[in-house]
Amino acid sequence: MRNVPVKALPLRRVIASKQAANREKDLAVLPILLRTLRLTNRLKKNRTRIVQPAKRRKEN
């Protein structure tokens, strides 16, 4: 199977769902999911800094 579209919840919604369920097995994975979310946000933040081109100086 190739090129099959798959729908997935954003990580924030998965975390909210696990917290709302409040089951032992859901609570057990929360620390990993929260760390993953923090790391993802940090990487996105750093990527936007790197991608932005430097401003050019006007030559007179």
Image (cartoon, rainbow, N blue to C red):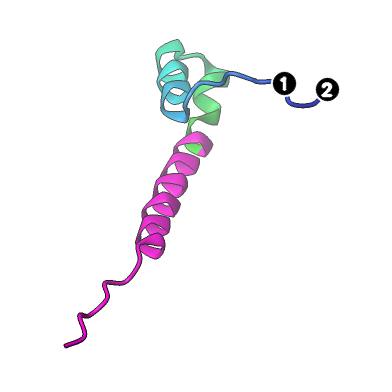
Tell whether label 1 touches label 2 (CB within 8 Å).
yes
Question: Seen from this angle, which residue lies furthest left?
Answer: 60
The quadrant of the picture occupied by the C terminus is bottom left
The residue where tag 2 is placed is: 1
Secondary structure mostly seen in the magenta stretch = helix
From the top left corner, tell me how far across and down residue 50 is, in percent.
40, 64
Magenta-span inclusion, residue 10: no
From the top left corner, tell me how far across and down residue 31 is, in percent.
48, 36
How many numbered badges does the structure rendering display?
2
- Residues 22 and 15: in front is 15
| Helix, strand or loop status at disc 1 | loop
Neighbours of disc 1 within 10 Å: few (<14), some (14-19), many (20+) = few
Q: Residue at x 48, y 30 (%)?
A: 30
The quadrant of the picture occupied by the N terminus is top right
The residue where tag 1 is placed is: 4
Neighbours of disc 2 within 10 Å: few (<14), some (14-19), many (20+) = few
Q: Residue at x 64, y 20 (%)?
A: 6
Residue 57, numbered circle: none
**Disc 2 to disc 1, C-alpha distance:** 7 Å
| Helix, strand or loop status at disc 2 | loop
Disc 1 marks a residue whose amino acid type is Val
Question: Seen from this angle, which residue lies furthest front?
Answer: 60
Question: Seen from this angle, which residue lies furthest right?
Answer: 1
From the top left corner, tell me how far across and down residue 22 is, in percent.
45, 14
- Residues 26 and 2: in front is 2
Disc 2 marks a residue whose amino acid type is Met
In the image, which residues are magenta?
Answer: 32-60
